Image (spheres, coloured by chain):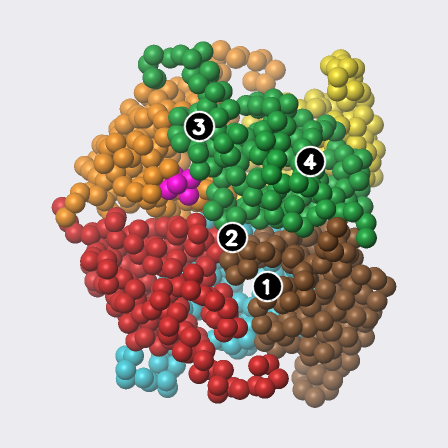
Chain colours: A yellow, B cyan, C red, D brown, E green, F orange
Amino acid sequence: MAQHIALYPGSFDVATNGHLDLIQRAAALFDKIVVAVATNMDKLPVFSVQERVEILKEMTQHIPNVEVTSFDGLTVEYAAQIGANCIIRGLRAVSDFEYELQLALMNRELNDEIETIFMVPSVSHSFLSSSLVKEVASMGGNISDFVPPAVERRLKEKYAKTRNTTCDPKSE
Amino acid sequence: MAQHIALYPGSFDVATNGHLDLIQRAAALFDKIVVAVATNMDKLPVFSVQERVEILKEMTQHIPNVEVTSFDGLTVEYAAQIGANCIIRGLRAVSDFEYELQLALMNRELNDEIETIFMVPSVSHSFLSSSLVKEVASMGGNISDFVPPAVERRLKEKYAKTRNTTCDPKSE
Amino acid sequence: MAQHIALYPGSFDVATNGHLDLIQRAAALFDKIVVAVATNMDKLPVFSVQERVEILKEMTQHIPNVEVTSFDGLTVEYAAQIGANCIIRGLRAVSDFEYELQLALMNRELNDEIETIFMVPSVSHSFLSSSLVKEVASMGGNISDFVPPAVERRLKEKYAKTRNTTCDPKSE
Amino acid sequence: MAQHIALYPGSFDVATNGHLDLIQRAAALFDKIVVAVATNMDKLPVFSVQERVEILKEMTQHIPNVEVTSFDGLTVEYAAQIGANCIIRGLRAVSDFEYELQLALMNRELNDEIETIFMVPSVSHSFLSSSLVKEVASMGGNISDFVPPAVERRLKEKYAKTRNTTCDPKSE
Amino acid sequence: MAQHIALYPGSFDVATNGHLDLIQRAAALFDKIVVAVATNMDKLPVFSVQERVEILKEMTQHIPNVEVTSFDGLTVEYAAQIGANCIIRGLRAVSDFEYELQLALMNRELNDEIETIFMVPSVSHSFLSSSLVKEVASMGGNISDFVPPAVERRLKEKYAKTRNTTCDPKSE
Amino acid sequence: MAQHIALYPGSFDVATNGHLDLIQRAAALFDKIVVAVATNMDKLPVFSVQERVEILKEMTQHIPNVEVTSFDGLTVEYAAQIGANCIIRGLRAVSDFEYELQLALMNRELNDEIETIFMVPSVSHSFLSSSLVKEVASMGGNISDFVPPAVERRLKEKYAKTRNTTCDPKSE
């Protein structure tokens, strides 16, 4: 039997409990999961690529067959490079699905040996999105149910800094 | 490394080139694919369960790691019984997605050890559905681009018989 | 310049103001519109194919470049037969769109010379569907805003008869 | 202040924990909620209208401002009759939304004084549908997480009977 | 009976006839509607928060149980602060629905006492969006059918100014 | 018979094989197709309006009844100006559909004489979008299957320049 390696690429700014749930589920289906931060996906990230890799490593240290890296360039080229023939993507909503379908078909055109598969996070995480979590955190809302402790701690630090530097007496 | 077995359940009445494409793609990702005809899914099937199993065996005989069977009862129970921890479902359209998502979440509630993954058929098969193929065949349209020869031959026989028995001079 | 003929096929059981609106809009874009009742589309129609043709003729008699007919068999074959290179379909909702897209792509496979185009009814008719109108009419609701007089009169007669024959004192 | 009465109409064959969740949420927003079984909605119901009313009463007996009834005819007419100016409908998925939107707009045309509002069940019930629950129950699956005890008990009795009467040694 | 207060939060840049329609419908269902401009929602607003509050007050002065305010921070916290147990959101399209569903579930996690309900604007306003109205206005199109006079007047002034300051002889 | 002119407006930054396919299909249905680059649609275009017009002319030079131009201002006003009573838009996905429906209804409000019709590109182009093609090209991926030679050549030149000017040793 050949070893089955799956690539889970993404922006992961910020990683949520939904991402963690998906990684755990995928780790049961394949011999190795490579979680890889795409360096060119997010315009105004909260965390640097290096921070995102550190967070993902901390979050997944209890899952033996998970590796965390980063990459730039085409996802299918990176998948081929690491010996993965499978790309994992999470689906929560119809709007996810349409874009992901388009991306999967484009990636298949670029390399027909690499297959995209879709997985569904736990229903209790189905409403979580990185942008919504960042919005709540930026307003001082409690995000401890939405993200792993590794993220919550760092996100609080980030927004504490932002609030001090942009200190606006009117809106405090 | 444990052996990875994936269950691909369905009605398969009728199996199309889209189903075949998905089976081929799945066979590259897992050690074994069990294609299983669900005996209680279709109200007025064109083919009996036994015929559908035969057709699927004929269609997939060139793929070594594929087995064809049938089952009744809950899909997750059958998956557990055959040692599969993964159910494969094809996604073509948004309307597929919503029902499939609901089914996947229900199945997860029934057995959290069995994971549903979604795959996308080749774009050239994205418009194919069993019901549309049956409708075209029933009107005498050419379906040779839509189904494997094993299906086309049998479907022609079926509709030839139907036309003779329900012979309606007015509509001929 | 060649004459541009467009086929507008459908079940038309029952024709609504949304259908009429679409026919009027299409008549402004093409030299001739053939409105054609598909004889094999509806399982339990309220009106016979002949009645539906009569109703559509009555509804569209004020539009000079509209013809009403019926057909059975494949829509693309009928289009080719009458010299139409264009099939018109109405779109109201996303769920319409998905099925219609699938149908359009299937029809293109069957005959690449026949193109499907989609038009949108007036926003004030966007919620109208034949089945909803029939449901309201069957409960004695007022449908005069939803269907042309030619339909309303006949639909009242139909449901008046039904109510008399299935006479259920409890529900009257 | 006028009393605010909301009508929650439906087929309720079978009532799920999703329905109960919605009734509880609605009861906090309005002075009185009338849960009403529509007698003409389901073709082949598992429970009679009378049984469904009994089940809903048992399920909601702990919520003081809830009444359970049944009705036939147009929903907007029944709403007007009981002094409700508001119809509540649950939304889980996009496909729900499209049909519900169409229904809401049609009802508004029939009576502009009656407003439809949409509510979302708890995310942990978002995948529940009456038909899926019935399907699982008919295959002997465990539905205790999906329906109130009042439904589970009766549903088990129903399917136990069905299995005995249609007794098929091959499928047991 | 307790007083039922509903919060209708939004960006309202620019308020359309669709917003006004929804406010009027909501005002019939609850004892008080608080329309509240969220100060942190729009990146490049046409109107300041103060202007948007003024416009909404002018638009709704004929509806006695409507108040207009502004707020920053989490919507659920503001709702709790003003004694509202209900957030109203308008739904026009499927794409609205998905984002709104996600937001509603997130808000429920943050405060389970605050319920989100969805309402549908008049069908004749179903295609209206603030961004589309702004686009049409910026090109000098007639928007008098889409927005209340209070908005039209101010929007004309805004774009008249913009045109003068960015005066580009080539594009005039 | 009057001459039927259809306007196909768009950003066309970058034009893909999907656009070309649609133009060819439309050219068979109408006497003349005017492909028109909207000058105010794209924020950060890769190509200038003039370049886009040149590319479209080169791409469509083999289709006799196609003209290429550019315009600013309202699309319906430009349609009226050139004698078109029909606007053509391509539909690939549900998310396209919703925005396009909104736009079509808004345009109808602005000028009820101009009708929007929707066409579907070839299924093999259904996953193509200008933004995805640009993303792949910017990463050095092979886009020769996705765009006409006229686009590929120019796009390579653009990104070659960009890479040189923003030369970042770390990411090369």
Nearer to us of marks 1 and 4 is: 4
Q: Which residues are magenta?
A: F105-109
Say which residue appears at 50% left-offset and 69% top-offset: C141
- Amino acid at pointer 3: Ala
- Amino acid at pointer 1: Val
Q: Secondary structure at mark 2?
A: loop
Say which residue appears at 67% left-offset and 50% top-offset: E29
Mark 1 to mark 2: distance in Å?
34 Å
Is residue E8 visible in the rendered image? The answer is: no
Which label belongs to residue D76?
1
Horizontal arrangement in the rendering, residue A60 relative to residue C8 (left or right)? right
Badge 4 crowding class, 10 Å Cα cut-off, few under 14, some 14 to 19, many 20 or more, is some
Nearer to us of marks 2 and 4 is: 4
Q: Chain of mark 3?
A: E
**D9, above or below E110, in the image:** below
Residue C158: x %, y % from top left: 42, 78
Tell whether label 3 touches label 4 (CB within 8 Å).
no
Q: Secondary structure at mark 1?
A: helix
Tell whether label 3 touches label 1 (CB within 8 Å).
no
Q: Chain of mark 2?
A: B
Residue linked to disc 3:
E137
Mark 1 to mark 4: distance in Å?
30 Å
Nearer to us of marks 1 and 3 is: 1
- Amino acid at pointer 4: Glu
**Do the residues marked 4 and 3 share a common chain?**
yes
